[in-house]
Amino acid sequence: MTFQFGLSNIYKRGYPKAKTAVMREAGGFMDRGFKGKLRKKELLVGTVLGIASPEVAEIISEVGFDWVWIDMEHAAIDLVQAQIMTQALREGCAAVLRVPWNDSVWIKKTLDIGCDGVIVPQIKTAEEAKAAVQASKYPSEGTRSLGLARASKYGMEFSDYVRKANEEIAIILQIEHIEGVNNVESIIETPGIDAIMIGPYDLSGSLGLIGQLEKPEVEGAIQKVKRHCLEKGTPVGIFADGPESARTHISDGVTLIGMGSDSVYLWKSAKSELERLSESLSD
C-alpha cells in the first residue's frame, strides 16, 4: 500500500508560516484540503491538544503535524479557548475538534468556530451516528442552524460558507465501546460520515480491561472495526501512544493517526532532560 504522507514533504516544501493576522486567509477559515485528503486516504498524522493554550497549539502545528485534535471532551478547553487555539495554527495544519458529547448544540457551536472537522465521541448505534451527521450539516442534508460566527468570517462570507460547509467539513465518528464495535456495520452505512476514529482506551474499559490494549479481546475488537471500515472503503483512524503503535496501525491500513498528546510530549521531554542532567552530574 502506498501512502501520500504529509509529513514526508515537510523539508521539501519548508514550513509554511502562521498568519500574523487573527484570521487564517487561505481558503477562508478552513483548511479546505483536509476532508479531500481524508477521503483519498492519504496518511494524516496529528496529535491531541489538551492544554488550553494558543501558544502550545501554534508550537505543535509548527512541528509539522498534518492536523491537530483539539479535545473538548476530556480537557479543560472551552469554546472560546478552542477558537483561539484554532486561530493560532500554522496554515495547512487542520483543526479537528472533539466535542464533549453527541449533542446538537455542542456540534453547532463547535462548527461555528470555523474548524475543518469534528470528532463525535461514544457512537454506539446507527441512530446515534445519524444524529451526529444531522447536527453537523445544514438543511436539507441536516438540521444545523444558521448563525453569524467565525466560520463565515462573521457574515462577510456567509452565503459562500453555507453553500460549501456540508461538503468541506469532515464528520468523524468515534467508536470506543464494545456496543459500537458490535454495530460497526450499520454505523458505517450511515450517509454523511467521513471517517471512523477508534478510541482504544475507552474500548478496553468497556470490555473490563482498562488500558490493556494488548489483550486479545481488545485487539480483536479494534481489528473488527478496522476490517469493516476497510471493506466498506471508509477511512479509519485511531489514537496511538507513539511511533511504534502508529506504524502498526498504518500497516493495517489506518490513515488517520492521532499520535500522542501535548501534555505527554511536554512531561516526557522535561523528565528526560532532567534525568540527563542528573546522570551527568553523578558521573
Image: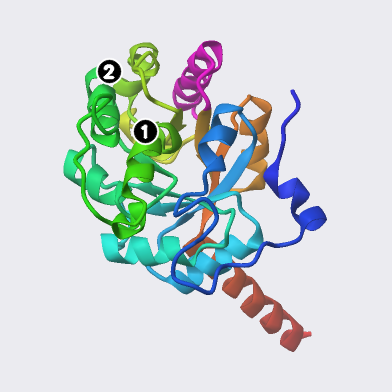
Please say whether residue 78 is visible from this viewpoint. Answer: no
- Between disc 2 and disc 1, the foreground one is 1
Secondary element under disc 2, as helix, strand or loop, is helix
Quadrant position of the C terminus in the picture: bottom right
- Amino acid type assigned to the residue bearing label 2 in the image: Ala
Name the dominant secondary structure of the magenta segment: helix
Task: Work out whether 110 lies above or below 184.
Answer: below
In the figure, is residue 137 to the left or right of 64? Answer: left
Q: Which sits in the foreground, 101 or 108?
A: 108
Q: Position of residue 189 (x, y in %)?
A: 38, 13
Q: According to the image, label 1 marks what residue? A: 166
Q: How is the image coloured?
A: rainbow
Q: Position of residue 147 (x, y in %)?
A: 21, 49
**Range shown magenta:** 215-235
**Picture mark count:** 2
- Identify the disc placed on residue 45: none
Q: Residue furthest bottom?
A: 281
Q: Label 2 crowding class (10 Å Cα cut-off): few <14, some 14-19, many 20+?
A: some
Task: Work out whether 70 lies above or below 140.
Answer: below
Q: Position of residue 228 (x, y in %)?
A: 49, 14
In the figure, is residue 121 to the left or right of 275? Answer: left
Magenta stretch holds residue 29: no
Magenta stretch holds residue 229: yes
Please say whether residue 153 is visible from this viewpoint. Answer: yes
Q: Which sits in the foreground, 68 or 228?
A: 68
Quadrant position of the N terminus in the picture: top right
Q: Label 1 crowding class (10 Å Cα cut-off): few <14, some 14-19, many 20+?
A: many
- Identify the disc placed on residue 126: 2
Q: Position of residue 192 (x, y in %)?
A: 37, 23
Rounded to the nearest whole Å, what is the CA distance between mark 2 and mark 1?
A: 20 Å
